[in-house]
Amino acid sequence: METFQSLLAKRLSDALAKAGLPNAGELTPATDRRFGDYQTNAALVLGKQRSENPQTLAERVIVRFDIGELCEPPTVAGVGFINFTLRADAIARKAGEVLRDERLGVARTKSTRRIVIDFGSPNVAKPMHVGHIRSTVLGDVLARIARFLGHEVIRDNHVGDWGTQFGMVIYGWKNLLDRQALQRNPLAEIVRIYKETNERATRDPQVREACRQELVKLQAGDKENIDIWNECVAFSMQDFEHVYKLLDVHYDIQCGESFYSDRLPAVVDGLLKSGVAEISEGAVVVFFRDESELANKPCIVRKRDGGFNYATTDLATIDYRMNDLKADAIWYVVGAPQILHFKQIFEVARRESYKADFRHITHGSILGDDRKLMKTRSGENVPLRELLDEACKRARKIIEKKNPDLSEADKTDIAHKIGIGAVKYADLSQYRMTDYVFSWEKMLSLQGNTAPYLQNAYVRIRSIFRKAGESVPKIDKFTLGDPAEINLAKRLCQFAEIVPQVLNDFRPNILANYLFELANSFHTFYEACPVLKSEEPSRSSRLALCNLTGRVLGRGLDLLGIKVPEKM
Ligand code: ARG
């Protein structure tokens, strides 16, 4: 289905051609709704290009613009913007199309690709903590949206399961392990032995050496060490799986670092053979002498002692994703501290002639009240499991107050949807690069740009139908009169414009903000326009508007990985 934006853009392009002008600029929703619904800067861009007066150019274009039944005659404003105002009739018709469409107007993209999305990717032998929310939730949403738009998505958890930490974990396991503690809380015990070994190793060079030996043995395939490693990985994965279940996040594959361990020598050989890497002081290194940004930042792919690096694994990973998985694009949803790392490996991949669209999708941090990285009172990372449990607990209190008569099972279910939804939405409604302060009060508030506010709007709509015992009326076309209902219908038509936009710069906050505005438009409409008490054909039209709003809210939140309750 064509959106208003694409329809207007086509007609603009025709008008430009008729005026003997090429396409230029952009057609976007109006920044100031008082002047119209959409605007274009085409005349401004052309004016600059050809040193002509943009207002005169704009006038030349608008007289050739075919308004049809779509919009009012366009107007020129300010220095040469062209504004378009949709006709209520066109809105009523388009909203009718959206109403009948399963996909709510959102078209499948024409150029579908196979996209590997690498997100979450925690390190084993440590519990997932609050810092993992962003990558996990953002990656999940991008995957949902890309899939909805028709791309073939492979969600990959690139678990850090083969790092140097294992030297210490294995040493600790052999020398410090408390079996009973392991049974009670495996991950806590693994973290304890790891930390204690780490402390000893800093004090005692002998322990340090012993840890190194354990790592060498592990990498050489020593049976005992492999068994210990396997057990540790399994315990960690259990913790991760628990969190993924709470978050409703799924992976198609989980190829961790260890998956690539026996491919690393070949990667280095390949780089040497192609001349991309060279031997320098006994190590194998890629230099970026003529890349200004990376000039003094060589990438070591094999250390002097023969060991491989994080970068080597990532290069092996690229090879696998390109040659085995046949990816057209690889998206890495990983925090900003790894910007340099990805610049390096993308450049190496380019030199090795891997032709995929590589994207590092970075994000900022979650802060505590003190505006520093969020930590527990004792300065530890906040375990994600505990944080999510707390979210549900707090949501439960809200429900007890709001609707004490619900059944136990309903309360638990709704608390889960609200609690987890609140944590996700607090993250997704921010621009991903912004650091934000984690605040229970704010994210769980029933007012403002929060998940509970949107869920509540959805529930209110559902209850209109429940209370009235009404089913959804079948209408061909909306009957729109009141400005509040015209405005709501217009917003509903925009869902199809917003969803694809999220992927332009990987910004789910665009969708979050749209849903917030939609809920606001709905409340304004609901206050201004009686629904059940109005006369036909308004009554059916308004009921259908309610229905469509509920569907768009539900689908939008679903794309954000947020569930909607039927009551709350
Ligand atoms: N395990 C890494 C970390 O916790 C993130 C991995 C990201 N993905 C990748 N292909 N390097 O920092």
Image (spheres, rainbow, N blue to C red):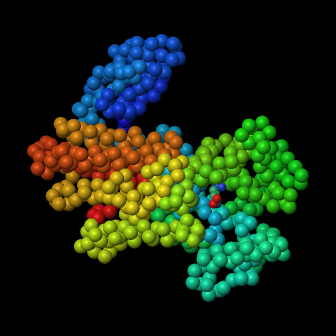
Residue 55 image-quadrant placement: top left
The residue drawn where x is 51% and y is 17% is: 48
Q: Quadrant of the N terminus?
A: top left
- Using residue 225 as the reference point, say whether residue 409 is left or right of it: left
* Residue 438 in the image, given as x and y percentages of width and height: 47, 59
* Residue 143 in the image, given as x and y percentages of width and height: 50, 52
Report the label total. Answer: 0
- Using residue 542 as the reference point, say whether residue 444 is left or right of it: right
Residue 160 in view here: yes
Instruction: Indicate whether 202 appears above or below 249.
Output: below
Instruction: Indicate whether 44 appears above or below 33.
Output: above
| Closer to the camera in the image, 335 or 72 | 335
Residue 413 in view here: no
| Closer to the camera in the image, 22 or 35 | 35
* Residue 472 in the image, given as x and y percentages of width and height: 21, 52
* Ligand 1 quarter of the rendering: bottom right
- Using residue 422 as the reference point, say whether residue 542 is left or right of it: left
The residue drawn where x is 46% and y is 67% is: 388
Q: Quadrant of the C terminus?
A: bottom left
* Residue 520 in the image, given as x and y percentages of width and height: 29, 47
The residue drawn where x is 26% and y is 30% is: 87
Residue 564 image-quadrant placement: bottom left
